[in-house]
Amino acid sequence: MTVIFSKKCEYGMQAVLYLAANNKDTTKSSDQISRALKIPKEFISKILQSLRNSGLIFSTKGKSGGFGLAKDPSQIKLIDIVQAIDGLEMFNSCVLGFPECSPDTPCPVHDSWGALRTKAFEMLSTETLDQLKDKTLTKIKTLQQE
Amino acid sequence: MTVIFSKKCEYGMQAVLYLAANNKDTTKSSDQISRALKIPKEFISKILQSLRNSGLIFSTKGKSGGFGLAKDPSQIKLIDIVQAIDGLEMFNSCVLGFPECSPDTPCPVHDSWGALRTKAFEMLSTETLDQLKDKTLTKIKTLQQE
DNA sequence: TTTTAATCAGACAATTTTATCTGATTATAT
DNA sequence: ATATAATCAGATAAAATTGTCTGATTAAAA
């Protein structure tokens, strides 16, 4: 089971973090990304295509082609990837699934969830990929060792 | 899209909250629950059956049968329903989908997500259904008005 | 110019989740 | 006893998500 985000979104975040952790101006092929992150090649390929359509990354075709960030890592935050793939709807929905959960018609945990939701949003929108680079590199290294 | 929990789990929590908000020792039929919460009858029926197998609620068959809480509302917390339906795995999984995300091999947001996760768990495990009763009744009233 | 290695696009397949249908069983009330 | 209204169980269907395949296009390198 996924925690909050869809698999697409999880993989998308991983892939963009990976691109951000590598040298700027060099592209990575979907095959490289697939192997580094152990994500099915065709699947990550599809996800990268859609992120390209959203303008977050770019791609070059042909031999030695691949994917790269469209902006500087200091200009991208995890929330941007979430928005592009899963959308931001979850940050405005009732955690118990009640329709129209609002300050006027709150569910039993409306207030406590509201506070948490804000924290979650902050978690994804404060730091830039730039700032996450070191931690990303450390994590990716551990993935190879299996 | 669901926020964190599956639809089954959302519906399950709604239904158990509904049962807890009503008088003890009276059962509600799946049809009543379905209409009160606007959840497809057969679907909520299935979910209630599984919650009955988990021992959280009981059911009586035959005419004037229905579902009721197996324990006092002061003995039940939302986390119990989550555990019975979705399980607690999400409170131990990486929000970015990385495998084996641990203090030793943390993902870039491991710490911040860990804190949030704890808060979320608290949100579901501090208050009892008893304590949520008033808020539940208020919310359910608003559902009828459409 | 030909080979090669990459993205791209669309169809397809598998799996999981969500929802529905049908008939059997059960027990109350008439 | 019989009719009625409920749960129960299992099969089925529909929808969404996840994953795969195939062929076309593109561009670098031999």
Image (cartoon, coloured by chain):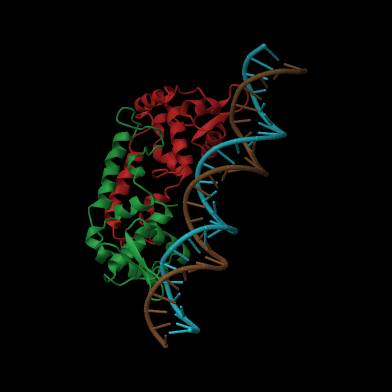
Chain colours: A red, B green, C brown, D cyan
User: Quick check: can you spot residue B143?
Assistant: yes
Residue B46 relative to residue B84: left or right: right
**Image vertical order of residue B29 relative to residue A67, above or below:** below
Residue A89 vs residue B125, the one in the foreground: B125
Residue in the picture at 22% in, 52% down: B126
Query: Which residue is nearer to you in this view: B73 or A54?
Result: B73
Residue drawn at 42 percent across, 31 percent down: A17
How many marks can you see? 0
At x 53%, y 31%, the residue is A58
Q: Is residue C28 above or below residue A74?
A: below
Find residue A123 and report its image quarter: top left
From the top left corner, tell me how far across and down residue C8 is, in percent.
Answer: 62, 35
Q: Quadrant of residue A141?
A: top left
Quadrant assignment, res B96: top left
Which residue is at a point 44% across and 36% down the rendered structure image?
A13
**Placement of A70 over or under B143, stated as above or below:** above
Q: Is residue A51 left or right of residue B31?
A: right
**Side of B26 where C17 appears, left or right:** right
- Counting from the top left corner in percent of width and height, residue D25 is at 69, 32
Q: Give the x, y percent position of residue A25.
A: 49, 23
Please tell me which residue lies in front, B55 or B118.
B55
Quadrant, the C terminus of chain A: top left
Does A43 appear above or below A143?
below
The answer to whether residue B146 shows anywhere in this view is no
Closest to the observer: A126 or A145? A145
Residue A109 horizontal/vertical position (percent): 29, 57
- Which quarter of the image is occupied by the N terminus of chain A? top left
